[in-house]
Amino acid sequence: MSGRFSAFFTTAAAGAAVALLAPSLASSQTGTLAGVRKGGRAKVVWNSKVRVAPGRLGVVLDERLAVALIRVTQTGAKSSHVEGLDLLAAGSLRKGEKVRLAEETAAAPSEGLSTLLVWSGPVGSPLLLDGKEAGVTPVALHLTPGPHEILLKLPEGDRLGAVVDLSVERERTLFLNGRHMPGVDPERLGRLHRWDPRPPSATRPREDAPAFLTLEWIEAPGEGRVYLPCIAIRPPGRVGAERPDSFERGAPPDPESRVILEGVIRPDGRFDNLRVITSRSPELADRALEAVGRWTYDAATLGGERVPVLATVVLGAVSPAPASGE
């Protein structure tokens, strides 16, 4: 199982679950980004003459890959102004990219509730909230204080899971990304990683990891969970390794040499399902796979028990600092 998915969790709002709105992407309302401004704002020209209500949610698509969550702020008969709620990086909106709207407008939460805006790749995936159906992504969940379990059901039967507690914040966004979407160009999948020059790794969790996200995992039918770096997981420590010759720390940065690998560090401390996420050179990718495949770790633990974790390893031109898998 394992190395096929990854999840990115970023800012927007918080809470615990009670009421929910489940918009569907079966909507025929589509458009194109025509004007992109700083601060994650843009203009959308619709393919048909419609009046879109402010507050409507939607996604920006790079082919079939969802790359941004948006909300309509102002609208006219043929175009609307939108704001990016979760771009995963500054400047990720691009002129000419397609926009698809959810069918419903995200209503304001009742007093005492917070809002969790959940979106995903692939879009339109069914969602479970505390074991009950909660519509399809993108979806606005209005939550009461306390922990809640969210499961995203993917086409092949796999699931992405998370435990969130939004007791403090009013609004957050959660992006769940199924990385094995059929028919999507691998270079476009790599766009998710290129947004972040230091992707989260098993051994070096993000310093800006959201506090509302306490646990996250992936699972396949008939198999156990593989966890992602998060608050509840004690990360593994690398025991020993050799770096490929082409990726020596003192070497001058070379954009052509950047290789990003992803795999699962098993409870025995070895990599499983190691694969290349981004590389411009097949030769360098092969060298990286061979070397990193020999690395060993002290296993990650959850509550003192050894568990498998998804790990990202970055080698090459990001910086001369240690790779993120170290």
Image (cartoon, helix red, strand yellow):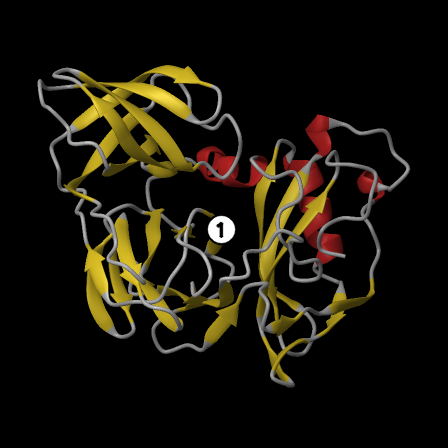
**Which residue sits furthest right?**
250
Residue positioned 83% across, 38% down in the render: 320
User: Where residue 321 appears, x then y in whole percent?
Assistant: 82, 43
Q: Say which of 260 and 8 sits in front.
A: 8
Residue positioned 48% across, 54% down in the render: 6
Which amino acid is tagged 1? Answer: Phe
Q: Can residue 63 be seen at all in this image of the molecule?
A: no
Rendered position, 109 above or below 72: below
Residue positioned 82% across, 60% down in the render: 241
Rendered position, 117 above or below 270: above
**Which residue sits furthest front?**
111
Q: Say which of 99 and 223 sits in front.
A: 99
Callout 1 crowding tier (Cα within 10 Å): few <14, some 14–19, many ≥20: some
Rendered position, 38 above or below 300: above
Name the residue carrying label 1: 8
Q: In which quarter of the image is residue 167?
A: bottom left
Which quarter shows the C terminus?
bottom right
Q: Quadrant of residue 229?
A: bottom right
Callout 1 secondary element: strand
User: Where residue 160 appears, x then y in whole percent?
Assistant: 39, 63
Q: Give left or right: position of 103 versus 243.
A: left
Q: Say which of 293 and 162 sits in front.
A: 162
Residue positioned 42% across, 21% down in the render: 94
